[in-house]
Image (cartoon, helix red, strand yellow):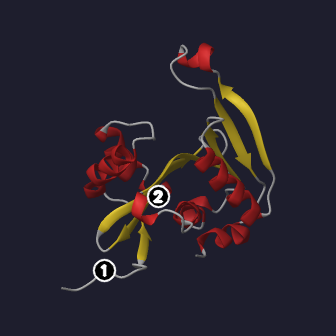
Amino acid sequence: MRQPAANPRTTIRRPTSADGEKVWSLVGATGSLDDNSLYCNLLQATHFASTCAIAEQNGQVVGWVSGYILPEQPDTYFVWQVCVGEAARGRGLGRRLIGDVLTRPECRAVTTLQCTITHDNEPSWGLFRAIAGKLDAQLRQLELFEKDTHFGGRHESEYVVSIGPFSPAQATALTRA
């Protein structure tokens, strides 16, 4: 019997409609991310494919980033969700997924990266602090959606995190392993 490689090769690509269910399953398996509907993931994988990315190892989806360019701020890429399966964690895959999107022609005008994070989400804080370091860009945070006012007390406050400014050349640093 053939043994799996200790460090399987990871490929990153744009998603297709056939990836929607795989993404939905990956996100659901984490247990810690907000679930979107399967339909939402299908729309992300089609309508927003140019600003989303899939990571695969041995034909299996092991990573996902969804995001979009803000309609009123064409210089800002907003990361909606980053998901890395347990078997692929600890190797910078989340950073590389974001870097892959930022180096695409659709993002040539992007100089700022944004996301929202709750204060207790240490993995996300670690990821975005590392990204700010790689980009040699400032990280700023501001409460965007307040627990009681916006979530009716059912979800912790979300802080908008902005990283930038950076250049397209700096964004290539995110794609390196």
Q: How many marks?
A: 2
The quarter of the picture where residue 144 lies is top right
Identify the residue shown where x is 42% and y is 58%.
86
**Left or right: 77 as drawn, with respect to 129:** left
Q: Position of residue 64 (x, y in %)?
A: 43, 56
Q: Residues within 10 Å of mark 1 (few under 14, many from 20)?
A: few
Q: Is residue 177 above or below residue 114?
A: below
Q: Nearer the viewer, residue 57 or 90?
A: 90
Q: Residues within 10 Å of mark 2 (few under 14, many from 20)?
A: many
Disc 2 versus disc 1: nearer the observer: 1
Q: Are marks 2 and 1 in contact (CB under 8 Å)?
A: no
Residue for badge 1? 4
Q: Position of 130 compared to 2: left or right?
A: right
What is the x, y in percent for residue 93?
52, 65
Gap in angstroms between the C-alphas marked 2 and 1: 32 Å
To which quarter of the image does residue 146 belong?
A: top right
Image quadrant where residue 22 sits: bottom left
Q: As drawn, is 56 to the left or to the right of 71? A: left
Query: The disc labelled 1 sits on which kind of residue?
Result: Pro
Which quadrant holds the C terminus? bottom right
The residue beneath circle 2 is 50
The kind of secondary structure element at disc 1 is: loop
Residue at the image position 58 percent from the left and 18 percent from the top: 150
Q: SS class of the residue under badge 2?
A: helix
- Residue 65 lies left or right of residue 118; in this view the side is left
Q: Earlier in the sequence, mark 2 or mark 1?
A: 1
Which residue is located at x 55 percent, y 15 percent? 153
Viewer-side residue, 108 vs 9: 9
Three-letter residue code for mark 2:
Ser
Residue at (79, 58) in percent of width and height: 137
Give the position of the N terminus as an image quadrant: bottom left
Viewer-side residue, 39 vs 9: 9
